[in-house]
């Protein structure tokens, strides 16, 4: 995948930027008519929601829903979406989504090439954020490059942060005017059995004097994480289309949810044509004898 050298606040209303059909049903992102029902949750939280993905049609629908305040991508998501032309994809996204920040990640393992790619990504548009991993694959710190790029005035998203040591190294080179997203992979931290909440809370406090820095909760696993992030004062949380859709369950009655779940099991069994034959006839359940011991 080559990269040529050539050259907000939460929105609580549905955007009209994309063409939508009320009957459209993409796998992943609900139609705008359905998504708009979730906007009640947006008035209950301050954390900004960024959609995480690389499917352009899903991104357009997420944008039109009014639920998101930005977008993030990465090479893994682009590979999953079948993207082959990096610059072509990024250009198409920026042509369709002109007024929200979008993060595109460098993909070199060499810091000199990373800088070249970062400068190219910055040309995609005024709201393009350059994602820089906190280290390369050799574990070498990207902090010197990050300092260099911020000095050039680039908007950065420093990604794949897991440890307090990484956060300290980054914080030590930031200035209040630096426009930088600090992406902490809380979900993956939790995958190790470690509670990510102390790390997130500490980061919010430690970076609070850096007015241009925004703490981002990356790789959430459930809707609850959105509210945990909001309670901690985290600025941004990325969500997949699956979690975005589950915002529709906000304040759903649990008894109703239980009944919906039972109905789902029942209907799926009917659709599968399951049968369990026996010689017990049509006797009521309370007249069926107990099995032998």
Image (spheres, rainbow, N blue to C red):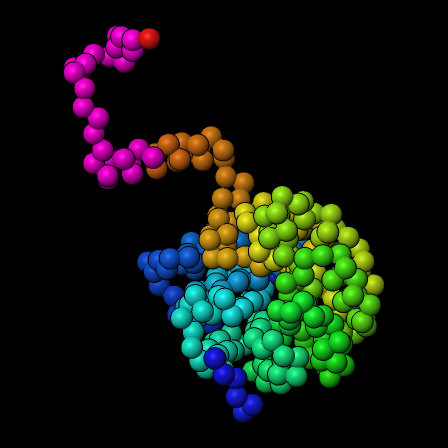
Which residue is pictured at 82% across the width and 68% down the height? 172
The one nearer the camera, 142 or 172, is 142
In x, y percent, where is residue 184? 66, 58
Q: Is residue 206 left or right of residue 101?
A: right
Which residue is pictured at 54% across the width and 57% down the height? 239
Q: In which quarter of the image is residue 150?
A: bottom right
Q: Is residue 87 above or below residue 43?
A: below
Magenta stretch contains residue 88: no
Q: Quadrant of residue 273?
A: top left
Task: Tell me the quarter of the image containing the C terminus.
Answer: top left
Which residue is pictured at 66% across the width and 45% down the height? 194
Q: Is residue 151 visible?
A: yes
Q: Can residue 99 be seen in this view?
A: no
- In the rendered structure, which segment of residues is drawn in magenta? 265-292
In x, y percent, where is residue 145? 72, 78
Magenta stretch contains residue 290: yes
Which residue is pictured at 81% across the width and 58% down the height? 206
């Amino acid at each position: 995948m080559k990269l040529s050298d050539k050259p907000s606040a939460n929105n609580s209303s549905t955007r009209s930027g994309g063409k939508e059909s009320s009957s459209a049903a993409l796998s992943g992102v609900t139609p705008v008519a359905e998504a708009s029902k979730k906007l009640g949750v947006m008035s209950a939280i301050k954390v900004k929601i960024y959609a995480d993905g690389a499917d352009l049609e899903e991104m357009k629908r997420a944008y039109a829903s009014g639920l998101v305040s930005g977008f993030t991508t990465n090479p893994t998501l682009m590979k999953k979406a079948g993207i082959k032309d990096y610059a072509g994809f990024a250009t198409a996204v920026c042509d369709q989504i002109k007024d929200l920040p979008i993060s595109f990640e460098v993909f070199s393992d060499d810091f000199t090439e990373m800088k070249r790619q970062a400068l190219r990504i910055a040309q995609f548009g005024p709201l393009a954020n350059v994602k820089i991993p906190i280290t390369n694959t050799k574990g070498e710190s990207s902090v010197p490059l990050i300092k260099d790029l911020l000095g050039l005035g680039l908007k950065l998203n420093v990604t794949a942060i897991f440890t307090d040591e990484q956060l300290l190294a980054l914080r030590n080179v930031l200035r209040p005017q630096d426009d930088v997203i600090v992406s902490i992979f809380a979900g993956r931290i939790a995958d190790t059995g470690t509670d990510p909440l102390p790390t997130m809370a500490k980061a919010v406090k430690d970076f609070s004097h850096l007015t241009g820095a925004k703490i981002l909760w990356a790789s959430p696993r459930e809707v609850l994480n959105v509210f945990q992030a909001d309670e901690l004062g985290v600025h941004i949380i990325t969500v997949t289309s699956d979690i975005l859709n589950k915002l529709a369950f906000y304040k759903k009655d649990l008894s109703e949810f239980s009944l919906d779940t039972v109905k789902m099991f029942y209907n799926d069994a009917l659709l599968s044509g399951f049968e369990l034959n026996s010689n017990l006839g049509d006797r009521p359940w309370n007249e069926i004898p107990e099995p032998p011991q």
